[in-house]
Every structure is written in C-alpha cells, then in structure tokens.
Image (spheres, rainbow, N blue to C red):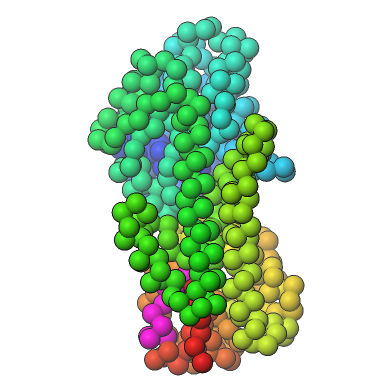
Amino acid sequence: MQVAIVGTGYVGLPTGVVLAHIGHIVLCVDRDPAKVERIRGGSSPIHEPGTEDLLREGLANGRFTATTDLTAAVRAAEVVILAVGTPEGADGYPDMTEFENAALEVARAIDKPTLVVTKSTVPIGTGDRLQQLMLEAGVPEGQVFILSNPEFLQEGTAIKNSLQPDRVLIGGNNATAAQKLADMYAPLGAPVLITDRNSAELIKYASNCFLATKISFINAVSRLCEMTGADVGEVAKGIGMDQRINPHFLGAGLGWGGSCFPKDVSGLIKISERMGYDFGLLREVVKINDEQALSFLNRVEKRLGSLEGKTIAILGLAFKPNTDDIRDSRSLVLIEEILKRGGAVQVYDPIAMTHVQRIFPDIRYTRDAYDAVDGADALILATEWNDFRSLDLAAIAKRMKQPILFDGRRAVIRAAAEASGLEYHTIGKRTMA
C-alpha cells in the first residue's frame, strides 16, 4: 500500500519506518529540508531506540524515503496519515493550528479517492470538523474518507509498541474505508477495534488519562507510606497482584511528564469544560502530580537543613529513560526549585543535556555520573537510565561532600547503597532512624 505520513516526530517517523518494514511504500513529509536530508542519510532526528535500524533498512530496500513535497506525497498515496503535533495551548485546550494547516494542505493536494487518517491526539469531533474542512477546500464528497487511528506509543519503546501493538484502533463512519485501513495493519497480527470516529478520539484521551490517574494514585499512596512506615513498593506489589488492577503503571516516583500525559490530561479537562462537564477527578490527578517532585525535594531540604549554599547533583534529565525528550520532565521542576531556594545544581544525562542547557545555561553540566556528584551535598536520581543502575556506589559516596542519595525512581537497592557508604532515601518509604 502507498502511504504518506505528514510529520516526522516521535509518532510519524517510528510509524513510517515500521509500515515500511512490514511491506508498505512510505513517504514521510516534513517542511524542514535539513531534517529531511538527515532522514534520507539514514540518521534519525529523534532519539528512539531501533528507529535508525529500520530507517536504514527502508532506505536500502526502497520502501521508505522522506520529502518536503507534500503535494507529490499525497498524490502518490492511497493513505495519508496526519502525525502533526497538537500541543497544549495557552488555556490548556489542544492547539490545532499546525494540524489544521497541514490538513488543508492535504486537501488542496487530493486528486483521487484517499483515506485521510488522524494519528495525532485530537479533541473529540475533530474527524467531523476535518470532513467539513475538506469539503470547504473543494474536495468532492466521496473522494476523501476521514478515519481516526490514534497512536499508543511510549517514548523509548515506540518501535516495539508499533511492531507488537496491544490493539489497532480505527474510528470511521465508512465501513469499507475502515476495513482498508485495518488491512494495512494486518501483517502485525494485532487485535483490531473498529468503532465510530468520536469514540476512537475519546478512547485515546481516556487511555492516557487513566494511566496518569493510576500513577498519581500510587504517588499519593507513597506519601502516606512515608508518614506511616509502610513501603510503597510492597503496597504496589500487593494491589498489582489483583488481576482487576495489574501491576503496570504502579511504580511510584517523581511524577509523570513527557509529551503525552501532561497535554492529554489538560486537554481532556478543557474539552470536558467546553462540553459543560467539570472533570474534577483529573484536576486532582494534575494537582497530585504537580506536588510530587516538590514533596520529594522538601525531604531533601529537611535532611540538609536548608538548600541555601548546598550543591545538589541530579542524575537524569529526560522525562524517562531511552529518550532525549525533556518536555515536562520532573528534573526541570527540581532544578528550578533548587535554584530558587539558593542551591547550586550539577547534572548528568546520557542524551538530554544539550536540550536542558537552553533552559538552564548556568548550572554545571558534567561528563559522567561520577563527575556530577563531586563535592555534592546530596544526589537525586531523577531518571532511571540503565547506566545508573550499575554505578560504582562506593565511588559515588567517596566523591560526595555528604554521601546522601535520594532515589526518586526506586532504582537502587537500599542494601547495596548503604553497604557502599551512602545514606539512602527513596519515594514511598520513611527513613528509619
């Protein structure tokens, strides 16, 4: 099948290389000539494990390429996938400007019956609006079929998620068009749910918001554990063994961030408001998440007496491992607050430091984790990169001014830390005297 994908970001590029891998002819479109040339050269503009391998495979066998020419890509395609960003607007509602501009460009290029597929996360009713925009742009009725096909990718594992999806969700008001899109994904062997467009658009929001709620719930429980002496790891294990709940997304930590949860939770709150419903549960989910990192930092400050004049080392700047994405990273919250309270910050991340330098140019960026802890009064582990799980903890302790570790991701084994000379604190566990 001939497929055009508009957008080469964290959704568009992994989707494109996977579709090429399973046998389709894919043309990814981006307006940035430099990015297109980089992709054509076999180099991914995003850090996503496995993407470059499949990109080079697709370039070599001729099933994948990239272009700036949207019109040519659309006219060569049977299926056009919109994977354009819908960021959080100033009021929390999704900013649809770039998405709708891209859709109008697609409409002007259509010259034959085409499936236009929304993969971006969009407000409920977007498919209906898109249909109207296409008609207003002069596309004859019956020549364009609007389908919703939300992505359920996780940064850091997007290729695996694309190759082994839990389900393929298709929302459409034309059964033939929906089945054609389902056929495109048939080589994956995944369960396919075909529903109406509005339901598909809401399923995407509801899924992410439910997962964010689950994380905020266990983080709220973690604070109760810190007050009572219970261990949130044991609590999560116990409730996760219930098959109705399962253990996924019950890892207590510093809170959620990234490109999806923050904007999708905010988006559904605002979408609901416009529909006349106050989604108070989600507002509380956001409140718990906003408080979590600060609650942890308050424990650091209490242990040190003050952050004024203290040096805090932070390991990990990306919002999660295996990505360079720092959007809504809890590390940024920690850095800003430490500086406000008079502390100094020195950091290390394997991938994401250059992005953070644009925001905080005056903190200390180091060459490795050991350099980051030199002379530090406390160390906060903020992102659970695998490299950090295998650190020489004794060497870490010796290089610190005060060998105090605050593990914000429960990634280090307490016994190992303490045996190495580190005083150990973590999420959801009261430090015993």
Residue 332, quarter of the rendered image: bottom right
Left or right of 179? Residue 138 is right
Image point (54%, 49%), residue name: 261
Question: Is residue 58 something that shows in the picture?
Answer: no
- Residue 277, horizontal then vertical, whole percent: 64, 36
**Residue 413 among magenta residues:** yes
Count of numbered circles in the view: 0
- Residue 343 on the magenta segment: no
Q: Nearer the viewer, residue 378 or 26?
A: 378
Write the start and end of the magenta stretch as one range. 407-417
Of residues 160 and 131, the one drawn nearer to the viewer in this rendering: 131
User: Which quadrant is home to the N terminus?
Assistant: top left
Residue drawn at point x = 65 percent, y = 41 percent: 278
**Percent coordinates x, y for residue 196 in the rendering:** 45, 23
Q: Position of residue 389 (x, y in %)?
A: 39, 74
Does 357 appear above or below 122?
below
Residue 287 visible in rendering: yes
